[in-house]
Image (spheres, grey):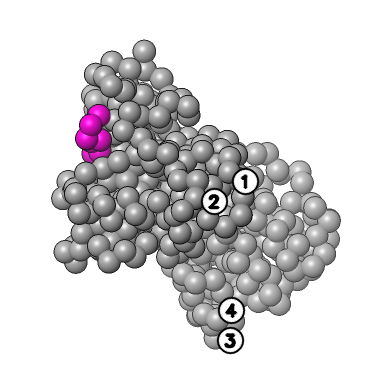
């Protein structure tokens, strides 16, 4: 029978996370999850030997979840993180061993220690981490995953683990069109379901030979949703900060140079300064694009809205009081700038009604609404009754 792998069935070659004696390390260099594939590609292309530590199982309370990765290079530098502390210290040690021996291993860590420095973690959960040298074939899979994200394409990264002696690890890439013809375990139906769910899935092939079933970690690789924030004032800045935390690819537009300065926004934010209507019209919009209009006045919001209301965005929201929204709505419908059906797609006033008053609270209400729309939660009737104008 094929089934998801249980948390309490360590592979024959698994070894336990040390309870003490290993030096605790801080989390590795901060690498956003979607960029770790590009880091692996870059390191291998520079002729550096690396090992990849991948969380293949995480039950209960654990510092990182399934699919988290850290990369160990031959100099002992850690890129990314699987949670820091003793777990990461052991993964680092195993990674350096894997680079030298070209052999993979599985680390199991039960986080039930007494706490304190240099002791086993106390989270209470169980993590299993496979640490494997990256081969040329792996490089191709990671490179294609990185390329898919760069091109805003979707696909699956498969990590196949055979817990024999020695442990065997193989990484594969499937782009979305190829999923339907995939014949190897776990098969096209499960693969398609996993991609649609956008969450990692673990499967064990019970038909595999002993000593343990083959485990397959299937990870959907999907581009981050685009967020276009029109207006770089206080509200736009606060929305950008919080949007970064929840995984949006952020672009901020304003017609004032002083409000498109990099210091005002999270690292990685794309900033565009120019005439609002032209900039919004030129921005690529697809069904995974979210647009937030928070300019300094209703005239600018209306100009931006006119430039994008006909486009296929997943979300379109505009800041303002109910009076302002009513004025803009009347103008758009009476002038023919938008049909009633098009206007019905606009979230205005923007944000969920959580009683927000301060700028950070307003930003939180906007982000909550973006998440609700992305996750398919109905929120059309939960609009705030009061919303100040952005600056």
In this view, the mark in front (3 or 4):
4
User: Which sits earlier in the primary sequence, circle 3 or circle 1?
Assistant: 1
Is 44 placed above or below 231 here? above
**Which residue is drawn at the image coordinates 34% and 65% (left, top)?**
77
Q: Depth check: give the residue in front, 265 or 284.
A: 265
* Discs 3, 2 touching: Cβ within 8 Å: no
Quadrant containing the C terminus in the rendered view: bottom right
The span from disc 4 to disc 2 (Cα, nearest Å) is 40 Å
Residue under numbered circle 4: 264
**Which residue is drawn at the image coordinates 55% and 81% (left, top)?**
263
In this view, the mark in front (1 or 4):
1
User: Which sits earlier in the primary sequence, circle 3 or circle 4?
Assistant: 3
Return the x and y of residue 154 as percentages of the image width and height. Answer: 35, 45
Is residue 17 within the magenta segment? no
Pointer 2 local density, CA inside 10 Å: few below 14, some 14–19, many at least 20? many
Residue under numbered circle 1: 114
The span from disc 3 to disc 2 (Cα, nearest Å) is 50 Å
Pointer 4 local density, CA inside 10 Å: few below 14, some 14–19, many at least 20? some
Label 3's element?
A: helix
In this view, the mark in front (4 or 2):
2
User: Which sits earlier in the primary sequence, circle 3 or circle 2?
Assistant: 2
Residue under numbered circle 2: 119
Q: Depth check: give the residue in front, 275 or 386.
A: 386
**Seen in the image, is 230 located left or right of residue 221?**
right
**Seen in the image, is 172 located left or right of residue 189?**
left
User: Which sits earlier in the primary sequence, circle 1 or circle 4?
Assistant: 1
Label 1's element?
A: loop
């Amino acid at each position: 029978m094929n089934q998801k792998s249980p948390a309490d069935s360590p592979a024959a070659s698994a070894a336990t996370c040390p309870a003490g004696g290993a030096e605790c390390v801080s989390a590795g260099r901060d690498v956003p999850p979607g960029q770790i594939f590009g880091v692996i590609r870059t390191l291998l292309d520079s002729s550096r030997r690396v090992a990849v530590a991948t969380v293949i199982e995480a039950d209960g309370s654990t510092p990182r979840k399934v699919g988290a990765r850290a990369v160990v290079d031959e100099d002992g530098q850690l890129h990314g993180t699987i949670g820091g502390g003793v777990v990461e210290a052991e993964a680092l040690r195993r990674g350096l061993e894997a680079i030298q021996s070209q052999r993979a291993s599985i680390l199991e860590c039960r986080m039930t220690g007494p706490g304190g420095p240099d002791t086993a973690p106390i989270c209470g959960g169980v993590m299993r981490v496979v640490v494997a040298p990256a081969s040329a074939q792996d490089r191709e899979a990671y490179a294609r995953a990185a390329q898919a994200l760069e091109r805003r394409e979707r696909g699956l990264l498969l990590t196949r683990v055979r817990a024999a002696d020695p442990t065997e690890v193989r990484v594969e890439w499937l782009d979305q069109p190829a999923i339907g013809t995939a014949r190897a375990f776990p098969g096209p139906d499960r693969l398609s379901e996993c991609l649609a769910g956008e969450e990692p899935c673990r499967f064990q092939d019970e038909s595999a030979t002993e000593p343990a079933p083959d485990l397959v970690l299937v990870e959907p690789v999907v581009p981050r949703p685009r967020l276009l924030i029109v207006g770089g004032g206080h509200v736009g800045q606060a929305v950008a900060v919080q949007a970064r935390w929840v995984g949006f690819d952020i672009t901020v537009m304003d017609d004032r140079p002083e409000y498109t300065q990099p210091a005002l926004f999270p690292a990685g934010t794309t900033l565009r300064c120019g005439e609002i209507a032209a900039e919004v019209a030129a921005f690529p919009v697809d069904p995974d694009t979210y647009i937030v209009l928070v300019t300094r006045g209703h005239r600018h919001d209306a100009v931006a809205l006119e430039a994008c209301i006909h486009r296929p965005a997943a979300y379109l929201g505009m800041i303002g009081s109910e009076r302002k929204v009513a004025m803009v709505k009347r103008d758009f419908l009476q002038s023919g700038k938008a049909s009633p059906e098009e206007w019905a797609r606009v979230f205005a006033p923007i944000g969920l009604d959580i009683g927000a008053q301060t700028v950070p609270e307003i930003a939180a209400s906007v982000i909550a609404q973006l998440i609700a729309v992305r996750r398919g939660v109905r929120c059309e009737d939960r609009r705030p009754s009061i919303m100040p104008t952005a600056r």
